[in-house]
Image (spheres, rainbow, N blue to C red):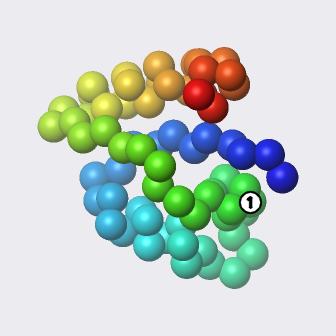
Amino acid sequence: MKTKPYFSVTNNLVDRLYYHNNPEAHSKSFSHKYKCKYLIYYEHFTDVETAINREKQLKKWNRAKKNS
């Protein structure tokens, strides 16, 4: 299976990581489907609007840029 970057905004990183590593049985979430288990990189923002804009910016990158 190829690597797939996953981008998301959360207000509780610890809970989000727990959920990704302990998905509900038969979950159809992106992270469960593609077995997203490792946090490679994160950015901290104090403003949610800024965080959402950054997420949208990252999601628009082409695959080569996302994987570099």
Q: Is residue 68 above or below residue 7?
A: above
Q: Residue at x 50, y 25 (%)?
A: 58
> Depth check: 66 or 59 in front?
66
- Residue 3: percent from left, percent from top: 72, 45
- Relative vertical location of residue 15 with respect to residue 50 in this rendering, above or below: below
The residue that mark 1 highlights is: 33
Q: Work out which quarter of the rendered image holds the C terminus and state it.
A: top right
Residue at far front of view: 68
In this picture, is 10 found above or below 54? below
x then y, percent, for residue 7: 51, 40
Q: Residue at x 22, y 36 (%)?
A: 45
Q: Residue 36 is drawn in which quadrant?
A: bottom right
Question: How many labels, in total?
Answer: 1
Q: Is residue 29 visible?
A: no
Q: Give the amino acid type for the residue marked by disc 1 in the picture.
A: Lys
Q: Looking at the image, which residue sits at the far left?
A: 46
Tell me which corner region of the image, top left, top right, bottom left or bottom right, holds residue 4: top right
Find the residue positioned furthest to the right.
1
Tell me what residue is drawn at x 67 percent, y 53 percent: 30
| Relative to 42, 8 lies left or right | right
Residue pictured at 75% horizontal, 75% vertical: 26
Q: Is residue 50 left or right of residue 6?
A: left
- Could you say whether the residue bearing mark 1 is in a helix, strand or loop? helix
Q: Nearer the viewer, residue 33 or 43?
A: 43
Residue 46 sits in which quadrant? top left
How many other residues sit within 10 Å of disc 1, few (<14), some (14-19) or many (≥20)? few
From where the camera sits, is residue 36 visible?
yes
